[in-house]
Image (cartoon, rainbow, N blue to C red):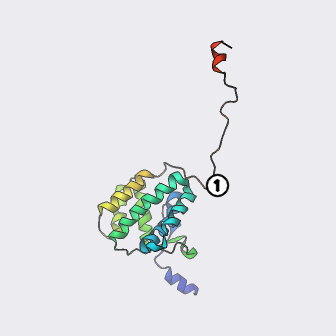
Amino acid sequence: MTHASVAQSDAGLVAIVDLPLDDFETGLLSVIRHHLDALNCPESQAWHRAYTIATEQWGDAIGFPAAHLLARFLKYVMKLRGGSFDYADPFGEHRKDWLSSDEAALLLVLHHMRRDNTSAARKTVEQLTQGWMDPDVIRSGLTFANRFPAGQMRPLHKDERPKLRVVSSAKPKSACQQDGAG
């Protein structure tokens, strides 16, 4: 493929860095793409990869519910859109930093909902749903946003482990020593 044909095939794409997304939202992109693969081709079992990626990024406590609530949201979006949704191959390296307009709208809906920005969320939902204000799409997006509001959580990175620290080095007294017996 020549440089000109790459530029033509990428026309209309949005650079992920040009959107006002936080790290959590940009981390959703790969999970979203695998979930979309699973919805388009159920026998691929791509939802396994979506859950695995989410738990590797944010740990079990955040990753599992994030992947689950995201899957529900995507199911309603795809149902409303009749399965017509432009997204990149989750394994394609050439598009990892680029979004289709559908992917951008999806991430922006979640971005605005997580910040309780109602007017912006309404506009992007309308764009995402091609003019339909579907209650299932809205409810599932708000459920995700309510569970994962912006600025309220710190993702656990996979190489980060809980740290133990000594609270007190004093040896506790036994019950006998406290009463004076003993």
Residue 89 visible from this viewpoint: yes
Q: Mark 1 points at which residue?
A: 159
Image quarter hosting the C terminus: top right
Image quarter hosting the N terminus: bottom right
Is 12 situated left or right of 158 in this image? left
Q: Which amino acid does label 1 sit on?
A: Asp
Which residue is drawn at the image coordinates 46% and 55% (left, top)? 65
Which residue is drawn at the image coordinates 38% and 59% (left, top)? 141
Residue 25, given in percent of the width and then of the height, sits at 49, 60
Which residue is drawn at the image coordinates 61% and 56% (left, top)? 158
**Placement of 91 over or under 170, stated as above or below:** below
Residue 100 visible from this viewpoint: no
Residue 55, given in percent of the width and then of the height, sits at 54, 58
Which residue is drawn at the image coordinates 65% and 41% (left, top)? 164
Residue placed most toward the observer, 73 or 152: 73
Residue 166, given in percent of the width and then of the height, sits at 67, 35
Residue placed most toward the observer, 123 or 94: 94
Residue placed most toward the observer, 155 or 45: 45
**Placement of 154 over or under 17, stated as above or below:** above
Q: How crowded is mark 1: few (under 14 residues within 10 Å), some or many (20 or more)?
A: few
| Label total for image | 1
Residue 177, given in percent of the width and then of the height, sits at 67, 17
Could you say which quadrant of the image residue 107 lies in?
A: bottom left
Q: What element carries label 1?
A: loop
Residue placed most toward the observer, 29 or 41: 41
